[in-house]
Image (spheres, rainbow, N blue to C red):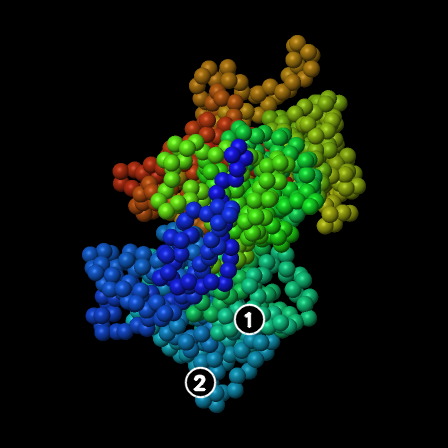
Amino acid sequence: MANSLHPIAICKTSEVRIKSSDIRRSQAKHSQALNWQNIRKISFFRSTTTIHFSTMLAVSSTSRLVARGARQAVVVAGQRQAAVQAVRRAATRGIQSVAQTDRDTITRLLYSIGTKREVERHLRIFSSSSHPSQPAKFAVIKVGGAVLAELDELALSLSFLYRVGLYPVVLHGAGPQLNDIMEREGVVPDYIDGIRVTNAKTLQVARRVFLEENLKLVGALEKLGTRARPITSGVFSADYLDKDKYGLVGKITKVDKRPIEASIRAGALPILTSLAESADGQILNVNADIAAGELAKELEPMKIVFLNDKGGMFHGVTGEKLDVINLDEEYESLMKEPWVKYGTKLKLREFKELLDHLPRSSSVAVISAASLQKELFTDSGAGTLIRRGYKLFKHNSIDAIGADRFRQVVHDRDPEVLAGFQSVTGVLNDLKNTPYTIYGDEPLDVLAVVSHPEGEVPVMTKLLASRSGALNNVLDNVFHAIKKDHRKLFWTAQADDENRGWHFERADGSFTRAGKSLFWYGIQDVAEVERIVKEFEANGRIERSYLPVGPSAPPHRAAANASPAGARAYSTMARRAFGRVPGSSRGYATAASTSTEPKRLGLIGARGYTGQALTTLLSSHPHLSLSHVSSRQLAGSPLEGYSKASVTYSNLSPEDVEHMEKEGAVDAWVMALPNGVCKPFVDAIDRGAKERGENASVVVDLGADYRFENGWTYGLPELYGRDHVRAAKRVSNPGCYATSTQLLLAPLVPYLKPGYLPTVFGVSGYSGAGTIMENDPATGKLVTKPKVSAESLKGGIKPYSLTGHIHEREAGYHLSTLLTSEAGPVKVAFVPSVAPWFSGIISTASVPLKEKMTAKDVAGLYEEKYKNEPLIRIQKDVAQLQDVEGKHGWTVGGFQMSVEGDRVVVVGGLDNLLKGAATQCLQNLNLALGYDEYAGIPTH
């Protein structure tokens, strides 16, 4: 038949529960050929298997337990025999590495609490969070005193993490134990403002209790074969919180992470108490929650876990456990809720203050010890997850998010566009055919388009996710928002889609042919699917190659493809058998909420190469418009290279600038002037800003005048953070050589050999030497010319400023802020040269190291330092000019060690006009103005 429907299978969710031993039989039935008229509706669920962690230890440590004659309880919800067999199999693996066997066995057992994909993803994320240089990046776990009472459960949960190669930093309190002892000794606890007043007698008892509880936990871990190290002093330094009021209570002033990192490097879990020492050696009592927060601020771990006996935070009215709290979106409204008061309000405030100091990849979990594995290794979690959050949007027009931003996402991610099967313009034109809604998150890590003509079934025509969006489960949250609005949905995906498994897990049914899959949810009736598919074919809403329609296969091919027992030729997928409802998983990192408010920019000194590069970038910015450009020599001439509007050069004086600032003519200024020239303009803006108060303009200076000034923020976001730039009104843009040098040396700063200088040899294109104005003989007009031409270099390079270059001092000055206070300043030996190409810097660093390392170790330092930076690319090969010229980021590679292993040579580079100037300027402008950091910047 010319238009016959191909056999399709779907799986309808039902309440059938099949034991895990029957799953294979269900799968065999599930694979039989099914067609429109003969659908066998089969569903199987993950058996309600629960495996206590003691089972995991029994499996992974059988030989040791048998040797000791120990016994561990095995609870497998009716599947005891399967676990016993696993134990027997594990006992035969004597030749294998015990550590690897433990990890493999426990990882497999973890599949009982989540899907294999979930577990392996979380393990991969956590395992990659730490590095030998920073081994304490996984988690800080604060253990409440009440949890210490359940010592065996706690020790099992921590041993579980140790067995899979994860090293949390554990800090415990001992409040209930302390109260019990003090009560027995006739001491009545005294509290002021919720803080325990601590006198000498109380402190004496507290020290004893802390040490006893610490050793109990260490001992319990050691009995399970888990190495642990008690750390009861030397980490926290403190001053008196208020000696007269609270007595011997401390306020932490410094955290020394060295004892913690030494413990982890030695293969032992660090177990801390919350006691601190003052400068004169006095022991001070510190609240354990506060100590955990200060510890987290220093270590910046992915997870901060607060273990309590309740297992989470709960709604004050309904009593239901709060699953996720997105602080960016919910904090203000939560704090106004009548049931949020006293302790709950204090906790939320403390969590927000903590997370505001940490990267957005960090999150807080409040959970019980027994559910720790489920919280860490499944998307659903088990306790309460608190994160800074992200805001989702949905709009009925691309204008609401900006046509340029939409176009950029389609250009960078749409597989049809990347393959050349469709153009960006074609995608935009298709949007006009039916009503549609765009879903996504503010940074556009995920963008989805749903077409929904009235009276027809919606079709998700685009689902474009960045790697970050998929990894951090923004994809799931956007999909969940779509499911809220649409009870039924169809969509398509290709076989080479890297998230192909994700589509199958969230679909109720699918049809696959020739590498193209059609998915749907919300429809269980086969006849309805058939009817909808025919409508799609008639209306052309889905490309025909995705639909189960078309000519029948030729007889000889049909016979050749026939399978025994009529096994079906096309893929189908039931609703995910195990885990949560699709779209409800929580993820880890979240993105900041950003502004989309249109704003205006004034550019002073726009005639040079950097000003021209910035002008070109601003043409593609979705929110920021160039309203004023000033150049004394080009006044009255039209601005070239800016496509948003017609702009004419003016010659603004400091008085003009002051008046414009008072009137609020612009929201930001960029100073693209020679060194030493911009101060009168900055002073004028400062005078005008006094009348505008908090609404004063942002100023970004591209010169060197303010790179060492107090009151100015140094804007190199990849090294010194984003938050301080977001809060700044005055930003100094780093120099081009200085940017490359700092990015090149920063990962190695902790390993610099004392008394030896790292040397950086930099070679830049001649555009870095600046410009001059000359009359064009042909037109008589002033034109920009390079100060140093390619011809003058005669094909060679020219070293200059052999000592004392300004970027040498700039790089050392700011790199020194990455050191601890005890270490001396960083000094850099820098030698620049100019080359006969137009733009692009290649920097070669030769760095003496204080300890021997391998090239792999060094490359790992760079990967860890810059792992989430879209404008930084790490490669194996030496960075060359073609890797950086015309690019908006920084590239590093060619990691080579000396024969002795105590000196490394690394090569990095950037375009001096882009990441070395204009692109970095736009990053800083975006942050300071509240935009997405990469708005208007191609990041692909």
**Crowd band around label 1 with a 10 angstrom C-alpha radius: few (<14), some (14–19), many (20+):** some
Q: In this view, does 371 lie above or below 765?
A: below
Nearest the viewer among 117 and 888 is 117
Q: Name the residue under label 2.
A: 181
Mark 2 vs mark 1, CA separation in Å: 25 Å
Q: Check disc 2 and give the amino acid type.
A: Ile
Image quadrant assignment for residue 266: bottom left
Q: In this view, does 188 lie above or below 470?
A: below
How many numbered marks, from 0 up?
Answer: 2
| Image coords of residue 429 (percent x, y) | 66, 32
Q: Is mark 2 on a helix, strand or loop?
A: helix
| Image coords of residue 874 (percent x, y) | 43, 38
- Label drawn at residue 884: none
Image quadrant assignment for residue 421: top right
Left or right, 336 with respect to 656, comes to left
Q: Nearer the viewer, mark 2 or mark 1?
A: 2
> Can residue 907 be seen at all in this image of the molecule?
no
| Image coords of residue 502 (percent x, y) | 48, 48
The answer to whether marks 2 and 1 mark residues whose Cβ atoms lie closer than 8 Å is: no
Nearest the viewer among 154 and 456 is 456
| Image coords of residue 76 (percent x, y) | 36, 68
Nearest the viewer among 255 and 51 is 51
- Label drawn at residue 241: 1
Residue at image location 49% in from the left, 21% down from the top: 837
Q: Is mark 1 on a helix, strand or loop?
A: loop
Q: Check disc 1 and give the amino acid type.
A: Leu
> Can residue 15 be seen at all in this image of the molecule?
yes
Q: Residue furthest top?
A: 778
Q: Which of marks 2 and 1 is nearer the N terminus?
A: 2
Residue at image location 39% in from the left, 72% down from the top: 153
